[in-house]
Amino acid sequence: MPIRTTHMRKPQSGFTLIELMACLAIVTLIAGIGGPSLNRLLRQHRAGTALNALTADLALARVAAISRGKAVTACPSRDAATCMDDLDWTEGWLVFVDGDNDRRLGAGEQVLATQQASRTPGLQLRSTAGRASLRYLPSGFSYGSNATITACLDGRAYGALVVNNAGRVRVERAIGAVLCAPPQG
């Protein structure tokens, strides 16, 4: 009797076109749902980073005023060389030793920190009316009314920095959907 041999077929590996299309549909669906959430998360992170950078630079201004025995000014700036008179800190800011106490960067005055604008769409940093700049005296105090610099993201408050008369800065995070006031020049 002849011996019969059977050849085992090697199973095929790979995907069928239908399996591939189903996987692509699932990946597209997940990306469509997760993409906007990731974008919002990234923008919130950038808003938090801007608040943290401003907090650090205001703390630097206070410490520098105390340690040098001279006034130090922090002001909004678009070019990292001149102070702006408006309340908008979105484009950046400037921190410098204000030897002549005029709240303007003059010749021979030392720049301690500059920050350029964060290119986060929909982010605004706005100061309270009447406090376009902050000046720290050699005592570390920042006399005047309390200053609040509010971070708004898409018209809603994200958080705020509050500087009291003693010069201390605290960060407040917005709770709920608090609307920001429209810009006032």
Image (spheres, helix red, strand yellow):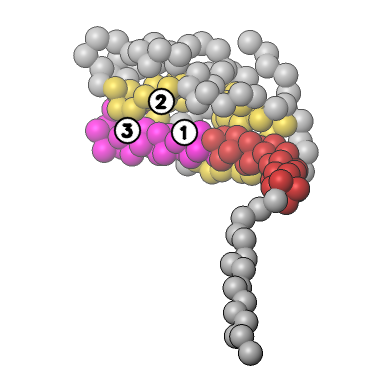
The amino acid pointed to by label 1 is: Leu
**Is 181 within the magenta?**
no
Identify the amino acid type marked 3: Ala
Q: Secondary structure at mark 3?
A: helix
Q: Which residue is mark 1?
A: 54
Nearest the eye: 130 or 152? 152
Is residue 80 positioned above or below 30 on the image?
above
Quadrant of the drawing holding the C terminus = top right
Identify the residue position indicated by label 3 in the image.
Answer: 65
Residue 54: tell me if it is visible. Answer: yes
The magenta region covers 48-72
Q: Secondary structure at mark 1?
A: helix
Local secondary structure at mark 2: strand
Asked whether residue 55 is drawn in magenta, I would say yes
- Label number found at residue 115: 2
* Position of residue 114 in the picture relative to residue 89 (left or right): left
Which one is in front in this view, the residue at disc 1 or the one at disc 3? 1
Magenta span: chief secondary structure: helix
User: Between residues 128 and 13, which one lies in front from this camera angle?
Assistant: 13
Residue 101 x/y as whole percent? 35, 17
Image coordinates for residue 40, horizontal then vertical, percent: 66, 37
The three-letter amino acid code for the residue at tag 2 is Gln
Q: Earlier in the sequence, mark 3 or mark 2?
A: 3
- Mark found first going from the N terminus, 2 or 1: 1
For image coordinates 24% across by 33% down, the residue present is 68
Q: Residues within 10 Å of mark 2 (few under 14, many from 20)?
A: many
Q: Quadrant of residue 71?
A: top left
Residue pictured at 64% horizontal, 24% vertical: 122
Alpha carbons under labels 1 and 3: distance apart: 16 Å
Q: Nearer the viewer, residue 48 or 103?
A: 48
Pinpoint residue 112: horizontal percent, then vertical percent.
30, 27
The answer to whether one can see residue 148 in this image is no
